[in-house]
Image: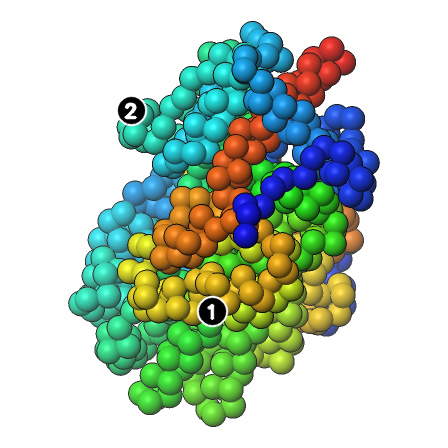
């Protein structure tokens, strides 16, 4: 079987059934998918496809964020998200800098407000922030004038990941509306799961979540998703199978007996692929534990779009930065 | 700072409504007691028109932060806030620094409060040294010094064996163990109730069973020993059920809840509102209703505030890092009145008993009341006027309340302890 191919722009426009895009974001911050309207999600996704075109030309440089400064503040380790934001800023012409959790001010116990206020006072326009505490970007957004982009807060949300996942689904399926999506893995600790459930269901997808019982948060069924403990039940007839990263240190907190047992009962295997629709795509936010969430052959399967997700991550983050900047400009000219 | 209200040898309060009978009555005070008549004209004559007289309220569960955390609260500000809320006696938990586990700390608290003259302080001593759950503290000596009960409060005694020893030993000195019921393993790292809200917000939850299981354990130990145990701040439907079942078996158990558990639910933390972060956490609507039912049928004997002052910096931060607790002395009676009495869940008399006679029994204090011969401890409350609560009015050092802007009735206008005015809104004495 040949490698699955994305749809062309024409094919996408024919299949596009989700609602109309907004013309502007309603907030200068992006804190979570919970706060976005369906029209705002479509605006970001449509913009992301334009950005992807920019990335496909040889001179990958625009002036949309010329003269703007962006700081990526990652109080928790990250490689791809941080780099993805950093590249997005550079392609848009912004001045960028970054600080991480090992920086001295954090180590010295400076409180979060003082840290971000310090960053803001260096004329920062947009603060991209990852933090181990759920709600930390919300706390910051209420207290500074710079725009805050949540790049992952605790177990709460990771909106740009959900947006890039949705962009990837549109790229291969043309639309989100009516898609059946199975999310498999550590649902309890996953901000990726939460953001995807909020975002996908807002524009009409049906989401199923399957996790070991010890990794299923209580009353998950009250979120807009179907909870399955059986991975195979979750994968039946779906358009998308999305694996979630298992933090292997969780085994030490006794949430599952062994990696071997996890892979056997909760890993994505070829039987899952057989149960899904024949054109179902395979996704994973990365980094993947090969042989745990899925074996390497599935990660590299013809229907895997895991590497494309990374490429779309840059485009989505460019779109978010571009739109937040436009919102800031509009707010400034209104005042 | 000391109580500097003008004081009077004799006080006559006319036209005030009696909390039990509802009749207009006259109260006469001399020599710190209610008296049948005065010799001559009273030094102070007050018209209590429109106000209701209650016995001085008693709070079986507060945190005064003194010694050790005076940046949050001290004994003077805490007792002033208590008088402001209509209290004439409050029982502080021992989680001070150093921990209230020896006689000098107990004496320090009692004496400092007595010198200030705003409200009696009835210290609760630590049940184990440094609240470490390893060795019994000097329960007998602290009892002699004035400790009224014993508890390790927020650091629950994990070992059932240690809890058994504490209950047995304290009972010998006619003192009760107060247990903050929380299984440490089940509650580990939790920052709110485990449920829909924690799942949606991506927060680590504390399951209701962490409380239920420990309440069951404590009541079983008390039953086995024939000792009295008191359950602090019940927040769950399961906890109410455990206490109810234990009482039905004849176990000597009493239990308290707090105004926030019958007023708020876990929904209050949405938007990462640290002011509603408290331990035990705010639970669900069905828990809230079970708490009210427990108050109605007498399963829950006492309403206590768990007044827990914190510095602004300890609340103005990331949700998971914020301290637990809220100030409650000044909103307690108005919440009880507006949320329990007015809707008809409790009669005024039953509600007041849970703030007076019942905690007095627990803490081995004389019977409170407005009867002749009893200490003149009382507060006059306005049950008619609606006040939009503003934390800026608080006499506590702290402002950490989730009740800002609540419309409440029942705020105290005048509080008297042993015949001395300890809070005066100025409305009667002007």
Q: Are marks 2 and 1 in contact (CB under 8 Å)?
A: no
Going from N to C along the chain, the mark reached first, 2 or 1, is 2
Q: Is residue B213 visible?
A: yes
Asked if residue B380 lies left or right of residue B279, the reply is: right
Tell me, yes or no, whether dots 2 and 1 are on the same chain.
yes
Q: Position of residue A175 (x, y in %)?
A: 72, 45
- Which quarter of the picture shows residue B143? bottom left
Residue sitting at 48 percent across and 22 percent down? Answer: A87
Give the vertical position of A167 relative to B370 (above or below): above
Residue extending furthest top?
A67
The numbered mark 2 sits on a residue in which chain? A
Q: Secondary structure at mark 2?
A: helix
Is B299 positioned to the left or the right of A7 in the image? left
Choose between B31 and B65: the one closer to the eye: B65
Chain under disc 1: A
Q: Is residue B412 above or below residue B156?
A: above
Q: Quadrant of residue A15?
A: top right
Q: Is residue B333 visible?
A: no
Q: Residue B138: where, in percent of width, then height? A: 20, 66
**Residue that mark 2 sits on:** A104
> What residue would you read off at disc 1?
A213
Q: CA distance from mark 2 to mark 1?
A: 40 Å
Q: Position of residue A9 (x, y in %)?
A: 72, 32
Q: Is residue A88 left or right of residue B132?
A: right
């Amino acid at each position: 079987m040949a490698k699955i191919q994305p749809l062309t722009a024409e094919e996408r426009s024919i299949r596009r059934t989700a609602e109309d895009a907004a013309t502007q974001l309603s907030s200068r911050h992006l804190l979570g998918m919970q706060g976005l309207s369906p029209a705002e999600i479509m605006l970001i996704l449509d913009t992301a496809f334009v950005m992807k075109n920019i990335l496909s030309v040889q001179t990958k440089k625009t002036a949309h964020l010329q003269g703007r400064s962006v700081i990526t503040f990652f109080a928790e380790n990250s490689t791809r998200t941080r780099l993805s934001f950093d590249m997005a800023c550079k392609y848009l012409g912004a001045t960028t800098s970054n600080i991480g959790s090992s920086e001295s001010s954090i180590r010295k116990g400076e409180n979060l407000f003082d840290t971000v206020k310090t960053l803001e006072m260096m004329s920062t326009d947009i603060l991209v922030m990852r933090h181990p505490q759920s709600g930390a970007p919300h706390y910051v957004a209420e207290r500074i004038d710079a725009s805050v982009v949540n790049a992952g807060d605790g177990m709460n949300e990771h909106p740009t990941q959900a947006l890039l996942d949705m962009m990837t689904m549109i790229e291969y399926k043309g639309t989100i509306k009516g898609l059946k999506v199975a999310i498999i893995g550590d649902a309890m600790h996953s901000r990726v799961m939460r953001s995807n459930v909020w975002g996908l269901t807002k524009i009409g997808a049906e989401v199923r979540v399957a996790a070991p019982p010890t990794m299923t948060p209580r009353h998950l069924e009250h979120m807009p998703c179907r909870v399955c403990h059986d991975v195979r039940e979750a994968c039946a007839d779906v358009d998308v199978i999305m694996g979630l990263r298992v933090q292997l240190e969780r085994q030490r907190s006794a949430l599952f007996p062994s990696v071997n047992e996890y892979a056997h009962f909760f890993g994505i295997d070829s039987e899952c692929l057989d149960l899904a629709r024949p054109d179902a795509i395979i996704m994973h936010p990365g980094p993947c534990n090969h042989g745990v969430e899925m074996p390497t052959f599935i990660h590299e399967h013809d229907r895997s779009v895991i590497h494309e997700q990374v490429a779309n991550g840059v485009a989505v983050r460019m779109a978010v930065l571009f739109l937040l900047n436009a919102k800031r400009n509009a707010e400034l000219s209104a005042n | 700072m000391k109580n500097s209200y003008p004081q009077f040898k004799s006080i006559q309060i006319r036209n005030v409504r009696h909390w039990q009978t509802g009749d207009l009555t006259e109260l006469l005070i001399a020599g710190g007691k209610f008296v049948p008549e005065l010799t001559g004209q009273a030094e102070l004559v007050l018209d209590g028109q429109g106000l209701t007289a209650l016995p001085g309220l008693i709070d079986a569960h507060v945190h005064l932060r003194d010694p050790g955390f005076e940046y949050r609260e001290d004994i003077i500000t805490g007792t002033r806030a208590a008088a402001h809320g209509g209290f004439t006696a409050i029982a502080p938990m021992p989680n001070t620094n150093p921990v209230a586990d020896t006689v000098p700390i107990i004496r320090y608290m009692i004496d400092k409060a007595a010198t200030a003259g705003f409200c009696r302080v009835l210290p609760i001593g630590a049940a184990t040294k440094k609240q470490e759950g390893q060795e019994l503290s000097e329960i007998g000596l602290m009892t002699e010094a004035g400790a009224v009960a014993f508890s390790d409060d927020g650091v629950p005694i994990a070992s059932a064996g240690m809890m058994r020893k504490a209950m047995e030993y304290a009972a010998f000195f006619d003192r009760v163990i107060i247990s903050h019921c929380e299984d440490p393993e089940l509650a580990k790292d939790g920052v709110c109730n485990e449920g829909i809200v924690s799942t949606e917000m991506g927060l680590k939850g504390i399951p209701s069973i962490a409380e239920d299981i420990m309440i069951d354990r404590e009541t079983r130990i008390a039953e086995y020993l024939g000792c009295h145990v008191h359950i602090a701040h019940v927040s769950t439907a399961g906890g109410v059920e455990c206490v109810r079942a234990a009482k039905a078996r004849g176990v000597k158990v009493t239990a308290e809840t707090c105004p926030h558990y019958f007023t708020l639910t876990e929904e209050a933390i949405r938007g990462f509102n640290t002011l509603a972060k408290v331990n035990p956490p705010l639970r669900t609507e069905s828990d809230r209703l079970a708490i009210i039912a427990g108050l109605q049928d007498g399963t829950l004997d006492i309403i206590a505030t768990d007044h827990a002052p914190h510095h602004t910096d300890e609340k103005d931060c990331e949700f998971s890092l914020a301290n637990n607790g809220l100030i409650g002395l000044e909103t307690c009676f108005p919440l009880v009145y507006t949320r329990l009495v007015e809707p008809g869940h409790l009669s005024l008399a039953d509600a007041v008993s849970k703030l007076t006679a019942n905690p007095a029994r627990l803490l081995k204090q004389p019977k409170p009341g407005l009867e002749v011969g009893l200490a003149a401890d009382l507060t006059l409350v306005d049950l008619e006027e609606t006040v939009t609560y503003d934390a800026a009015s608080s006499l506590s050092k702290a402002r950490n309340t989730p009740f800002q802007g609540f419309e409440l009735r029942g705020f105290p206008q005048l509080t008297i302890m042993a015949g001395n005015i300890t809070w005066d809104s100025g409305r009667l004495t002007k």
